[in-house]
Amino acid sequence: MTRGTPIPETVTLHVPFRVVKRGGRKEMQLPDGAAQSRRTDSTLVKALARAFRWKRMLESGEFATIAELAEHERIASSYITRVLRLTLLAPDIVEAILNRKQGLDVTLAQVLEPFPLEWRLQREHTTLI
């Protein structure tokens, strides 16, 4: 536009994208090759924080059993057990999640699925990093 050209009242911009569900949230997915900002999956980070907090509470003797902890937190003991498994992830995988370097398709549900206990096998098994 030049200085003498009038500014239109309406500008239409077409951006190709699609909406996908990720971790129970709707998220915009851009086409391949488009720059995409990487955000921390807050549900995944929250679960990691809870897992390490619950582990510390159990190890310190604040709660003797997972059942006691579950009652205190008002959460099902089966969920606490699954989330506590996150403390067994390799440190570099935990760091990748916290630094937003995990795969774009990684969700809490995926991470809560059974995974190998050996760190080397976790790295081979997972698409986390």
Image (cartoon, helix red, strand yellow):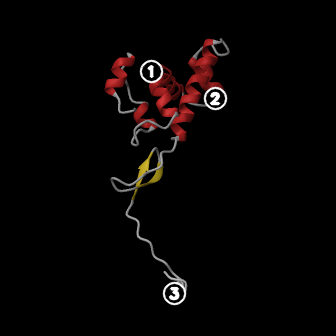
Find disc 2 in the rendering and name its residue. Answer: 73
Q: CA distance from mark 2 to mark 3?
A: 64 Å
Amino acid type of the residue tagged 1 in the rendering: Ala
Residue labelled with disc 3: 5
Between residue 25 and residue 93, name the one nearer to us. 93
* Mark 1 and mark 2 residues within 8 Å of each other at the beta carbon: no
Give percent across and percent down for residue 4.
Answer: 54, 88
The residue under the point 34% across, 53% down is: 33
Tell me the mark number nearer the camera, choosing from 2 and 3. 3
Residue 61 or residue 100, whichever sits in front? 100
- Mark 1 residue element: loop
Q: CA distance from mark 1 to mark 3?
A: 60 Å
Viewed as shown, does residue 26 lie left or right of 122?
Answer: right
Q: Nearer the viewer, mark 1 or mark 3?
A: 3
Q: Quadrant of residue 61?
A: top right
Question: In which image quadrant can residue 18 be found?
Answer: bottom left
- Identify which residue, 23 or 77, lies in the foreground: 23
Instruction: Kindly indicate whether the residue at mark 3 contacts the one at mark 1 (C-beta within 8 angstroms).
Output: no
Q: Amino acid at mark 2?
A: Glu
Give the mark nearest the N terminus, 2 or 3.
3
Quadrant in which residue 13 is drawn = bottom left
Q: Looking at the figure, which quarter contains the C terminus?
A: top left
Q: Position of residue 20 (x, y in %)?
A: 40, 53
* Residue occupied by mark 1: 90
